Image: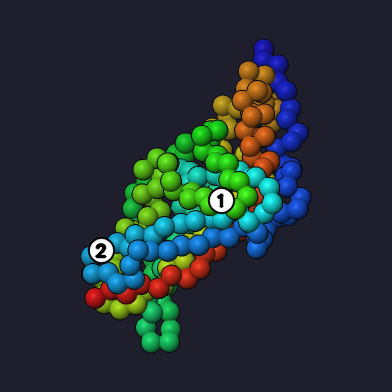
Amino acid sequence: MRIVSKILASCFCFLPLLGCGQTPSITCQISTVKSLYKIGETPAIAIQIKNSTDTTIQMVKVLDGSEAKWRYPHLYYEVFQIIGNKKRALKPNLHTRCGNMDGIGVNDFVEVRSGQGFDPLANQSEVYTRSISLFQWSFKKKGKYSIVFHYSTAEVELKKWMGDTNTLWFGMNNEVFSDKTEAYNHLISLFNRVPKVDLTSNELLVEFN
């Protein structure tokens, strides 16, 4: 019989000055090395989430299922074709993916000091990063396109970040297994330093010919 220990800190944020939701102190900027591409190319986008607060925070890399909004953090692009004065939203090409999701670990958290930037796709599994890359959009027509990137950590419950691994951590009454308590407390200590924000990047304009 396992002895379980309930962890109460999982739904609290220890960054009250940042609040929950959008904040001008944490911003998202995307850029590209060139604005003119040829038909068939995929725009190369650089992502920087900047910490302009006066404290060190933790941010989370893209995870398995983030692009589908199955779990937090949510990471995804929006692409629009510009036709005259109007924008037409484009849908990514459908792709087959596994219905299961990996868990979350301490290596998925990144310390971001005041004034530093963070790329949620850097140093992460290619399986996860390719799932949200712009190769899913087919830029087949000449003209101008608008690209926007979204990153959201707006969920205070760690369970909604953990993928399909909840049964490995929790037993009866949603209590953490005793042999997992130390590891879970470590995750909680990192998670509590993640500001809960919804970020939308600048609009990036590219052209295809």
Q: Quadrant of residue 173?
A: top right
In what element is the residue under mark 2? loop
Tell me which amino acid carries mark 1. Gln
Residue 135 in view of the camera: yes
Label 1 secondary element:
loop
Relative to 70, residue 185 above or below: above
Q: Which quadrant of the view contains residue 92?
A: bottom left
**Residue 116: which disc?**
1
Q: Which quarter of the figure is the C terminus placed in? A: bottom left
Residue in view at x 23 percent, y 65 percent:
40
The 10 Å Cα crowd at callout 1, few under 14, some 14 to 19, many 20 or more, is some
Q: Which residue is mark 2?
A: 41
Q: Is residue 190 above or below residue 139?
A: above
Can you give x and y, in whole percent of width and height, for residue 20 in the image?
Answer: 70, 55
Q: Position of residue 143 (x, y in %)?
A: 30, 78
Specify the amino acid type for callout 2: Glu
* Residue 173 visible in the picture: no
Q: Residue at x 43, y 79 (%)?
A: 87
Q: Earlier in the sequence, mark 2 or mark 1?
A: 2
